[in-house]
Image (tube, rainbow, N blue to C red):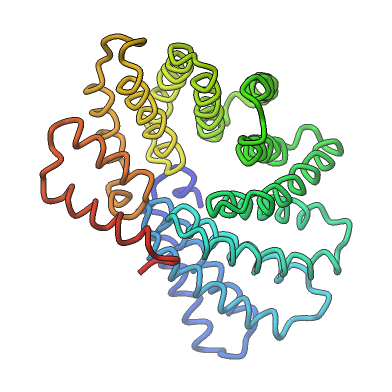
């Protein structure tokens, strides 16, 4: 885990493969030993997280499913009051759902998060006052809301994200210093705003985003070292604020918001291959390029090429993401066209992959 948190996924994978092999030997020696199977499931789940961070979503799916199968077996033989193994099963299912969501397989993600919530309902029946399950349920509801929103099921998405927000607000009231609860509350609030976007007027959007900016700022002040989590959060906020300002007829103000965000991101993302940070980086620059092209008469001459080059450079921090992660792949393809490289064979292959995968509900 030390290697994983240091973003050294090669060394983390090496250590976890050794762990997997040791636990597999234990299972082979004692096939009916429940503890051995649970330990093996932890090894597979850890290997899945390393694949996930590399955007190897097919590999991650395989490892997570192995972990899930072992945990399901453990649940079948567990005591009916064993909340721990059920919560562990929900955790691996949640990782699988997140994998599908990042890969753009929203129907599969929505289905898996439904399974997560069903398992957590069992946990809640066993431990009704346990904040561990409450937190996991809130996060699962937020992720399912993301999938539902992308499937254009706004009413269902809003129901989930509002439930997540209410839970996290209540939990934070109990422990205001808990950083995990705090930042997930902010993520839920920004997701809720995105889901409600069409029902709000332009002025209301700007007003709510301004209030949210203050709350994010409070978190940033209290937790100055949670850099990568803040990159993602500020990136989402900046993108929404830019949309709101454009809708109000203020493209120059929108461009300024995104430019400030891009400068802030550069310090963090250029030294990191964190998947979520890279997504944020390329999306901010993609929006800047789009604004510059659409509103050139207002913004004047903008060095679009340099921003396209930045997208190309940062995308290559996680080379496996090109042809695996739809958002990064689309931004990279657009950047190649901007740089006059759109006719290259690798760009054409990436475009074909994107077209094929967008028609599917789960990885091929």
Q: Position of residue 164 (x, y in %)?
A: 74, 47
> Going 25% across and 16% down the picture, which residue do you hit?
303
Name which residue lies at 36% across and 10% down: 298
Residue drawn at (56%, 78%), measured in percent from left and top?
69
How many labels, in total?
0
Q: Is residue 300 above or below residue 83?
A: above
Would you identify the image quadrant in which residue 215 lies? top right
Residue 220 in view of the camera: no
Relative to 47, residue 188 above or below: above
Left or right of 145? Residue 118 is right
Answer left or right for 284 relative to 193: left
Q: In the displayed structure, does residue 273 sit left or right of residue 131?
A: left
The residue that appears at 29% across and 32% down in the rendered structure is: 311
72 lies above or below 364 = below
Q: Which of these two is toward me, 32 or 321?
A: 321
Percent coordinates x, y for residue 261 in the rendering: 46, 21
Query: Measured from the top left, where is residue 130 in percent x and y?
Result: 84, 56
Could you tell me which quadrant the C terminus lies in? bottom left
Front residue of 225 and 210: 210
Residue 144 at least partly seen: yes
Could you tell me residue 301's position as x and y percent? Answer: 26, 10
Q: Quadrant of residue 61?
A: bottom left
């Amino acid at each position: 885990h030390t290697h994983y948190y240091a973003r050294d996924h090669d060394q983390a994978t090496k250590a976890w493969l050794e762990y997997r092999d040791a636990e597999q030997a234990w299972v082979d020696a004692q096939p009916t030993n429940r503890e051995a199977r649970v330990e093996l499931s932890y090894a597979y789940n850890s290997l899945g997280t390393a694949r996930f961070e590399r955007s190897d979503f097919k590999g991650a799916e395989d490892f997570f499913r192995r972990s899930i199968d072992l945990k399901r077996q453990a649940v079948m033989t567990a005591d009916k009051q064993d909340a721990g193994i059920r919560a562990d099963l929900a955790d691996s299912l949640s990782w699988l759902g997140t994998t599908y969501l990042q890969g753009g397989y929203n129907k599969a993600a929505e289905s898996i998060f439904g399974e997560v919530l069903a398992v957590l309902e069992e946990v809640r029946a066993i431990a009704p006052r346990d904040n561990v399950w409450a937190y996991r349920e809130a996060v699962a509801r937020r992720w399912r809301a993301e999938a539902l929103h992308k499937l254009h099921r706004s009413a269902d998405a809003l129901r989930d994200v509002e439930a997540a927000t209410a839970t996290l607000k209540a939990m934070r009231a109990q422990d205001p210093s808990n950083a995990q609860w705090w930042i997930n509350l902010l993520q839920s609030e920004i997701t809720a705003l995105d889901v409600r976007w069409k029902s709000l007027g332009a002025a209301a959007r700007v007003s709510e985003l301004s209030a949210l900016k203050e709350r994010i700022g409070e978190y940033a002040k209290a937790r100055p070292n949670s850099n990568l989590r803040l990159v993602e959060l500020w990136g989402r906020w900046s993108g929404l604020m830019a949309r709101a300002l454009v809708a109000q007829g203020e493209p120059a103000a929108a461009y300024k918001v995104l430019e400030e965000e891009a400068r802030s991101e550069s310090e963090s993302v250029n030294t990191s291959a964190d998947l979520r940070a890279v997504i944020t980086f390329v999306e901010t620059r993609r929006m800047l390029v789009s604004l510059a092209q659409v509103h050139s008469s207002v913004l004047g001459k903008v060095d679009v090429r340099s921003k396209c080059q930045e997208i190309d450079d940062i995308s290559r921090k996680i080379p496996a993401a090109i042809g695996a992660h739809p958002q990064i792949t689309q931004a990279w393809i657009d950047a190649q066209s901007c740089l006059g490289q759109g006719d290259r064979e690798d760009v054409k292959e990436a475009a074909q992959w994107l077209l094929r995968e967008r028609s599917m509900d789960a990885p091929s």
